[in-house]
Image (cartoon, grey):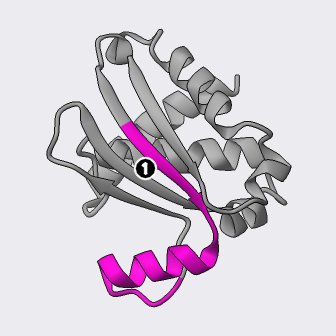
Amino acid sequence: MIKVNVILDHSKWKNKIKNPSNYLKKKLRKLSRLKYFQKKKQEFSILLTNNKKMKNLNFKFRKKNKPTDVLSFPSNNNIYIGDIAISYEIINKRSKLSNFFIEFDKMWIHGYFHLIGYDHKKIKDFKKMNKKENLILNYFHK
């Protein structure tokens, strides 16, 4: 079973997702029905924050002095796989053209794939990661 710890660092998240922890637990339960995820024993944390905090984290860890949508911090542990941080403002802005839940799911799924070893430095890796992300997103939102 994949478990998530949710840290709510910015109150506006609750305007869109009443109970982010329950929302993510339901998504992970659904995900665990897929063969690839059935035997996974993993845990990770998601920090739901704002642009100011994302800018600070992005500068501290990547030397980029601007906010970003999602950051992933993989650990070298097989069970606790790492941390994800997501910016409310960026997700909310993107959702004006889409849907808040779809945009949020895109970000945490993207972060999760980084935690389990995927990256997108090369175009072929980007395509592989993007394909897997879209399969899960379509599974959630069909």
Q: Up-down: is 89 above or below 25?
A: below
Quadrant in the picture for the C terminus: top right
When asked about the image quadrant of residue 30, the answer is top right
Residue 90 shown left or right of residue 67 in the figure:
right
Residue at the limit of the structure toward the bottom, as seen here: 65
Q: Which residue is mark 1?
A: 111
When asked about the image quadrant of residue 79, the answer is top left
Q: Which is more toward the observer, 76 or 91?
A: 76
Residue 118 shown left or right of residue 14 in the figure:
left
What residue is shown at x 56% (from left), y 66% (from top)? 69
Quadrant in the picture for the N terminus: top left
Secondary structure under badge 1?
helix
How far from the left and from the top, in percent, is residue 105?
Answer: 61, 41
Q: Which residues are magenta?
A: 44-66
Q: Up-down: is 44 above or below 121?
A: above
Q: Up-down: is 104 above or below 62?
A: above
What residue is shown at x 47% (from left), y 9% (from top)? 33
65 within the magenta span: yes
Q: Which is more toward the observer, 14 or 40?
A: 14
**Amino acid type assigned to the residue bearing label 1 in the image:** Gly
Residue 64 shown left or right of residue 75 in the figure:
right
How far from the left and from the top, in percent, is residue 53?
Answer: 54, 75
What residue is shown at x 47% (from left), y 82% (from top)? 56
How far from the left and from the top, in percent, is residue 28?
Answer: 51, 24
